[in-house]
Image (tube, rainbow, N blue to C red):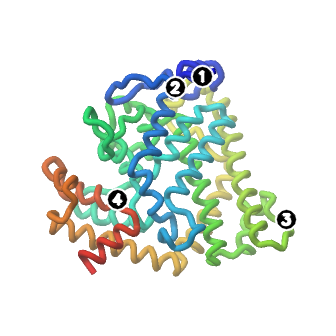
Amino acid sequence: MIIKREDLEGQELELLSPYAVRSAESKGRSTAEKEDPYRTCFQRDRDRIIHSKAFRRLNGKTQVFIAGYGDHYRSRLTHSMEVAQFGRDIARMLNLNQDLAEVIGLAHDLGHTPFGHAGQEALNEVMETYGAHFEHNEQSFRVVHELEKKSEKYKGLNLSFEVLDGLLKHRTQYDRPRAFDHLMPSLEAQVVNIADEIAYQSHDIDDGLRSGILNEKELLTLDISRQSAAKRIHSKDPEIRKRHLLTSIMSLLVNDLAGHTNEKIKKLGIQTVEDVYAHNGQIAQFSDSVYRMAVQLKDYLYEHFYNAKEVKKYNEKGKRIITKLFRFFYEKSENLPDSFQAMLDSEERYVVIKDYIAGMTDSYATELYKKYVK
């Protein structure tokens, strides 16, 4: 038996929660296309993301450590895969559209700079000198809506409206399709927004312990560790203890998010996707107590990991590379690749250079820095 798109759409219509996004009811694409016989629109979008150049480049972009620092540290690609996994799991628990959650998770960092958050800070500082700004969610939208090339009929990947909407998690007024006329994105997108936080907090604990920057005993004193089952294992193997710590914290965050969101949906009387769009505020949320624990964990990681001298050294290097590369290409734009030089006819020079640098991997940016600047 071959399962066709209509069968999958029928299953969604019959089985998903009434406030879940159904692929058969999608608002469509900017440019209309013939439907695939076997894949729903969101499954098609997922495949377009996975096969994009921007997605492949995520493997060479820093999460916290410079890409290539060690075989087991996260890259921006592995982070995106973990976000998609968390998003899909939580969507399943809430009976939402798992395919939509997955594709938003996979695409959410396509516009991220090299060198992690330090790279984003550096590019934003440069853009501010031109009266503009840089935010990686906006750039992710631009990547899939403008910069990737798939067809002569349209720019970008021509993704479904609900995916594009989910990438603009801060609800900024940036290059939006006219259909973006509501207050909040889908519940699937809201879930992925918090899945992003769960993913980076859990894997930053892992990378921090692996690097020796974070201390296991200190982590076990945090409220979230005490609330979870993290202290109930007494293995002598540090790897097993670490895995138990991580899974305990992840389970607590995921289960609380799903449970509290479900209760809030009932309390607010959410019945349809339109109810979600119209609600003035985030529906997918942690409970107050778990939110406070998550904030404490985030503050701990900021102080003891992101601001650690070992991490700051790489951050400073990355910021220096991005800032000087931007200045070089702005002054000598003839060194831009032909495809970006062609964009200068229709875009401001600083926008074109921003697009070029944001798409670089750490190693490529470092290579160009050594070639042109150093």
Does the CB distance between marks 3 and 1 fall below 8 Å?
no
Q: Earlier in the sequence, mark 3 or mark 1?
A: 1
Q: Earlier in the sequence, mark 2 or mark 4?
A: 2
Alpha-carbon neighbours of circle 1 within 10 Å: few (<14), some, or many (≥20)? few
Please, what secondary structure does the residue beneath circle 3 have? loop
Please, what secondary structure does the residue beneath circle 2 have? loop
Circle 1 is placed at which residue position? 2
Q: Mark 3 to mark 1: distance in Å? A: 47 Å
| Mark closer to the observer (3, 1) | 1
Q: Mark 2 to mark 3: distance in Å? A: 47 Å
Does the CB distance between marks 1 and 2 fall below 8 Å?
yes
Residue 250, compared with residue 160, is above or below; it is: below
Q: Is residue 314 left or right of residue 305?
A: left
| Mark closer to the observer (2, 4) | 2
Q: Residue at image x 18%, y 53%?
A: 348
- Kindly tell me whether residue 236 is visible in this rendering: yes
x and y percentages locating residue 192 in the rendered image: 55, 44
Quadrant housing residue 177? top left
Does the CB distance between marks 2 and 4 fall below 8 Å?
no
Q: Earlier in the sequence, mark 1 or mark 4?
A: 1
Circle 3 is placed at which residue position? 233
Please, what secondary structure does the residue beneath circle 4 have? helix
Alpha-carbon neighbours of circle 2 within 10 Å: few (<14), some, or many (≥20)? some
x and y percentages locating residue 182 in the rendered image: 42, 31
Q: Residue at image x 76%, y 72%?
A: 238
Q: Earlier in the sequence, mark 2 or mark 3?
A: 2
Q: Quadrant of the C terminus?
A: bottom left
Q: Earlier in the sequence, mark 3 or mark 4?
A: 3
